[in-house]
């Protein structure tokens, strides 16, 4: 099966644009609040985690960039929505550059172990996993937004 670069980019683009729209609709205050649910994360943290996913799975394993990632810190991230939206836009552009013309059957760009049996081992698998994460977290953010707005909406 061959996946078209444009299809992957379009799918990732929709998720990243949706994530940015959710953050903008919430504003700085609500984007930095977690729903009152056990283990819930703030929208800002979830979006920051998406950037970490792209940096690691595509930037490092596909494009071969040296990436320093602190996954735990992604879930503590807080800040201004406009700055995070700008980072998301830059990530959208970088992703398109990183995946165009990649041989999806080639092994990772940088040597890496396979820490989990169910993780991919090829560049194509890494790209698919990153897109899977973006789409999953976009959906999570839609629910998180709805919970936050139901709890904190002004009458």
Image (cartoon, rainbow, N blue to C red):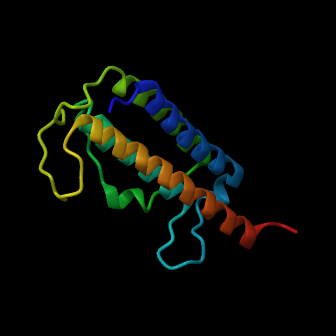
Residue at the outermost top position? 101
Q: Is 75 situated above or below 127?
A: below
Relative to the observer, which residue lies in front, 88 or 122?
122
Locate residue 152: give its quadrant.
Answer: bottom right
User: Residue 151: which quarter of the image?
Assistant: bottom right
* Residue situated in front as seen by the camera: 105 or 12: 105
Question: Quarter-wise, where is residue 100 in the image?
Answer: top left
- For the point 62% across and 63% down, the residue is 143
Q: Nearer the viewer, residue 49 or 102?
A: 102
The image position of residue 142, as x and y in percent, is 62, 57
Q: Can residue 78 be seen in this view?
A: no
Q: Which residue is drawn at 88% across and 69% down?
A: 155
1 w.r.t. 74: above or below = above
Q: Residue furthest right?
A: 155
- Residue 49 horizontal side relative to residue 11, left or right: left
Q: Which residue is drawn at 51% across and 37% down?
A: 11
Provide residue 97's location: percent of width, then percent of height: 39, 23
Q: Position of residue 108 (x, y in %)?
A: 18, 36
Which residue occupies 46% across, 50% down?
48
* 125 with respect to 117 (left or right): right
Q: In which quarter of the image is the N terminus?
A: top left
State whether residue 112 appears in this view: yes
| Residue 61 coordinates in the image, percent (x, y) | 23, 38
Residue 86 versus residue 142 in the image, above or below: above
Q: How many marks?
A: 0
């Amino acid at each position: 099966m061959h996946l078209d670069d444009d299809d992957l980019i379009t799918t990732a683009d929709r998720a990243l644009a949706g994530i940015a729209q959710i953050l903008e609709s919430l504003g700085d205050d609500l984007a930095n609040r977690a729903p009152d649910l056990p283990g819930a994360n703030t929208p800002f943290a979830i979006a920051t985690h998406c950037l970490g996913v792209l940096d690691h799975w595509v930037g490092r394993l596909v494009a071969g960039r040296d990436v320093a990632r602190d996954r735990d810190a992604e879930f503590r991230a807080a800040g201004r929505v406009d700055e995070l939206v700008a980072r998301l836009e830059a990530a959208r552009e970088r992703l398109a550059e990183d995946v165009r013309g990649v041989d999806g059957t080639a092994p990772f760009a940088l040597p890496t172990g396979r820490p989990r049996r169910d993780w991919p081992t090829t560049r194509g698998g890494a790209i698919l996993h990153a897109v899977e994460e973006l789409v999953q977290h976009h959906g999570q953010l839609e629910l998180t937004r709805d919970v936050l707005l139901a709890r904190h909406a002004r009458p």
